[in-house]
Image: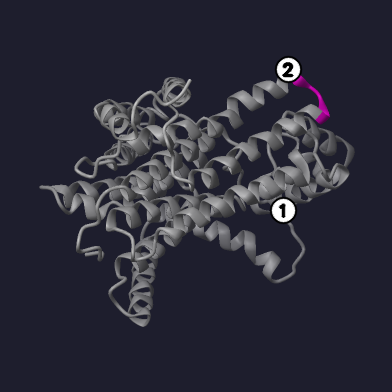
């Protein structure tokens, strides 16, 4: 089967379904914590429909698409290879289909969002809706259900991070919302609700990553000013955050806990408490030890719980880790689970996607392209920071969020490249 329609007619046909695509996207992001199974099903069905479209029409994609697609295929292939080497196919196939397939299915989505892109329509609204839903869920959890940490009925750490990911994307959309009536109000409301969900989740990693992405966004939006002026603005911003944060009891309590956990390591004192940091340090050691036993292919994507329990039973100092279901570090998790092959595929994914998004931040590209590139970069930075105390390229919701968000951003960026550039491409 070949491409039965010229590229221009193909784009015109797909552009007509853009409102429907946006509606499905709003549901996927808005229902991620309300109705996880339905949200995932919508994502899978949309990806399968996109795959059928790609097979039938074979749209001509820009050459950069290979730098987006092949690292994802390699990441999936590394997990599959580790499974084949280690066996346990019944549980292993379940891990591949319920986790790694979610990011693999992002590849056909790119073509749909590329061909349907229209600069006159708002491609960011789905993330705005997602942020507002997350904020509403967080307020409901804390104010109505009286929970200590907002979780949306799921894991609080995942909830806080997904709120961070959506907020990171919305941060890059100011130029679009500034052009419509009440757009600035919608933009800042989405940012505030996303930050509200992050704070109420009590996820310290998301707080730190949020500061990093805000600083990057500030440098981008203040590009007209000198480097020194931008640094001064960032310092003033951080001082303001510190003052405000110190007056929020929940934030101050979580920060005090971090200080108490880190202090013994800084002072080289003997550990007397089994804190969450100490638990992570111990499980990192376990992951490194497990990875050294099978350096090339790891212990397999379906054996994480079994391997951790085995080490906990064998070594007394690791017995408290028996209930942990991952290594709490994406790089050590990939090394232990899929070996050097899997770790190399993870680095390839990060490096290629980082290159793609930073490439289009240059001022010679249109403002639309640059802001989409900024969104992709902020999303990836969030995942990189989370990769040190967590496993964002392993959890189901994490993988679906990255697959969907990166595909929609990258596809829209490719579409924006085809649009004529406006005369004013400076950030205002």
Image position of 14 with respect to 394: above or below = above
Question: Magenta span covers which residues?
Answer: 85-89
Would you say 62 lies left or right of 283 here?
Answer: left
Q: Is residue 311 magenta?
A: no
Which sits in the foreground, 240 or 358? 358
User: Can you give x and y, in whole percent of width and height, for residue 335 in the image?
Assistant: 75, 46
Splitting the image into 4 quarters, where does residue 78 fall?
top right
Q: Name the residue beneath numbered marker 2.
A: 90
Instruction: Answer with mark 2 or mark 1, whichever residue precedes in sequence.
Output: 2
Which sits in the foreground, 4 or 14? 4
Residue at 80% across, 39% down: 297
Label 1, secondary structure: give it: helix
Q: Name the residue beneath numbered marker 1.
A: 281
Tag nearer the camera, 2 or 1: 2
User: Can you give x and y, in whole percent of width and height, for residue 300 in the image?
Assistant: 77, 33
User: Can you give x and y, in whole percent of width and height, for residue 315 in the image?
Assistant: 88, 42
Q: Residue furthest top?
A: 90
Would you say 16 lies left or right of 291 here?
Answer: left
Residue at 39% across, 67% down: 242
Q: Residues within 10 Å of mark 1 (few under 14, many from 20)?
A: some
Q: Is disc 2 in contact with disc 1, using a CB cutoff of under 8 Å?
A: no
Q: Is residue 88 magenta?
A: yes
Would you say 265 lies left or right of 25 here?
Answer: right
Q: Residues within 10 Å of mark 2 (few under 14, many from 20)?
A: few
Which sits in the foreground, 180 or 149? 180
Image position of 241 with respect to 73: above or below = below
User: Can you give x and y, in whole percent of width and height, for residue 195 in the image?
Assistant: 35, 50
């Amino acid at each position: 089967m070949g491409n039965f329609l010229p590229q221009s007619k193909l784009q015109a046909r797909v552009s007509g379904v853009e409102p429907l695509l946006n509606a499905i996207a709003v549901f996927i992001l808005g229902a991620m914590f309300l109705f996880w199974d339905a949200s995932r099903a919508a994502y899978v069905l949309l990806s399968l429909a996109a795959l059928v479209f790609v097979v039938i029409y074979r749209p001509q994609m820009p050459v950069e698409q290979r730098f987006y697609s092949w690292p994802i295929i390699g990441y999936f292939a590394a997990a599959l290879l580790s499974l084949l080497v280690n066996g346990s196919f019944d549980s292993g196939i379940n891990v591949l289909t319920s986790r790694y397939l979610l990011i693999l299915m992002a590849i056909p989505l790119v073509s749909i969002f590329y061909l349907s892109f229209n600069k006159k329509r708002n491609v960011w609204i789905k993330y705005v809706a997602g942020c507002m839903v997350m904020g509403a869920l967080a307020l409901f959890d804390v104010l109505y259900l009286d929970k200590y940490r907002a979780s949306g009925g799921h894991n609080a750490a995942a909830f806080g991070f997904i709120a961070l990911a959506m907020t990171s994307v919305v941060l890059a959309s100011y130029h679009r919302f500034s052009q419509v009536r009440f757009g600035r109000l919608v933009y800042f409301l989405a940012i505030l609700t996303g930050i509200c969900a992050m704070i109420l989740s009590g996820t310290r990693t998301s707080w730190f990553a949020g500061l990093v992405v805000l600083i990057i966004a500030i440098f981008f939006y203040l590009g007209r000013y000198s480097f020194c002026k931008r640094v001064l603005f960032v310092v003033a911003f951080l001082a303001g955050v510190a003052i405000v944060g110190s007056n929020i009891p929940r934030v101050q309590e979580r920060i005090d806990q971090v200080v108490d956990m880190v202090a013994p390591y800084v002072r080289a004192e003997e550990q007397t408490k089994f804190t969450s940091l100490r638990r992570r340090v111990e499980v990192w050691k376990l992951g490194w030890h497990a990875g050294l036993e099978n350096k090339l292919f790891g212990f397999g994507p379906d054996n994480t719980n079994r391997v951790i329990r085995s080490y906990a039973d064998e070594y007394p100092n690791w017995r408290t880790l028996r209930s942990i279901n991952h290594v709490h570090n994406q790089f050590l998790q990939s090394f232990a689970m899929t070996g050097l092959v899997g770790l190399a595929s993870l680095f390839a994914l990060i490096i290629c996607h980082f290159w793609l998004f930073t490439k289009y931040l240059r001022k010679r590209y249109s403002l639309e392209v640059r802001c989409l590139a900024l969104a992709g970069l902020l999303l990836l930075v969030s995942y990189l920071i989370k990769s040190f105390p967590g496993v964002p390229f392993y959890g189901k919701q994490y993988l679906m969020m990255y697959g969907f968000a990166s595909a929609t951003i990258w596809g829209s960026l490719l579409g924006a490249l085809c649009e004529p550039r406006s005369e004013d491409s400076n950030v205002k």
